[in-house]
Image: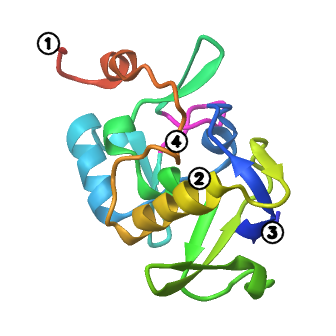
Amino acid sequence: MVPLPWSYVRSWRCTGCGICCVHYQVVLKFDEWLRIVHKFGVAVTGSGLNKLYLGKKPDGSCIFLTKAAGMHLCGLQDMKPTACKLWPFKIMRKPRYGRSREAIFNYRGERFYVYIDPSCPEIIWGRPTRLITEKVIPEFIEIALGTREKQVYSTGALIPNLQIKRRFSRRPLI
């Protein structure tokens, strides 16, 4: 599906549906790949022509995806790749998917083109709310720029991080 401009989105929030973790191949930056390989070994990653990826289970889902209590949970919360943090949003310096006027988002004196993947089921279409314009989109831009790591508005609200760490960590938790 072709991404659509952010200005068509009334609101969005991650509910842990897992669609992004099942249907998409996660491209890793080299430093992200190194951190993951250092902690979990090279077997949890894959490679293609000039790209590094998170590994997949036989069912096609991300190797770090766990399902518990009806939610899909990420085993990489403490080192989640940028591609995962940004999905379903795409932050760009130049328009790529058309409708550039609707995709423009001015942030701290800079112009960005923000699109959203319409395959995410948690999108509520309509006129953007203050939350999406004042909190969600700026947080995604900061993550894309590398000026923010911690997610507040751009991730699921209920993440039992301790259970996830226990399942994937090589070292015991204290």
Residue under numbered circle 2: 25
Residue under numbered circle 1: 174
Q: Which residues are magenta?
A: 55-63
Tell me which numbered mark, 2 or 4, is placed earlier along the sequence. 2
Tell me which numbered mark, 2 or 3, is placed earlier along the sequence. 3
Can residue 161 be seen here?
yes
Q: Amino acid at mark 1?
A: Ile
Tell me which numbered mark, 3 or 4, is placed earlier along the sequence. 3
Residue 45 in the figure: left or right of residue 4:
left
Q: Amino acid at mark 2?
A: Gln
- Residue 62 within the segment the image draws in magenta: yes
Tell me which numbered mark, 2 or 1, is placed earlier along the sequence. 2
Give yes or no for contact between labels 1 and 3 (Cβ–Cβ under 8 Å).
no
Residue under numbered circle 4: 155
Question: Cα distance, mark 2 to mark 3?
Answer: 17 Å
Q: Main secondary structure of the magenta part?
A: loop
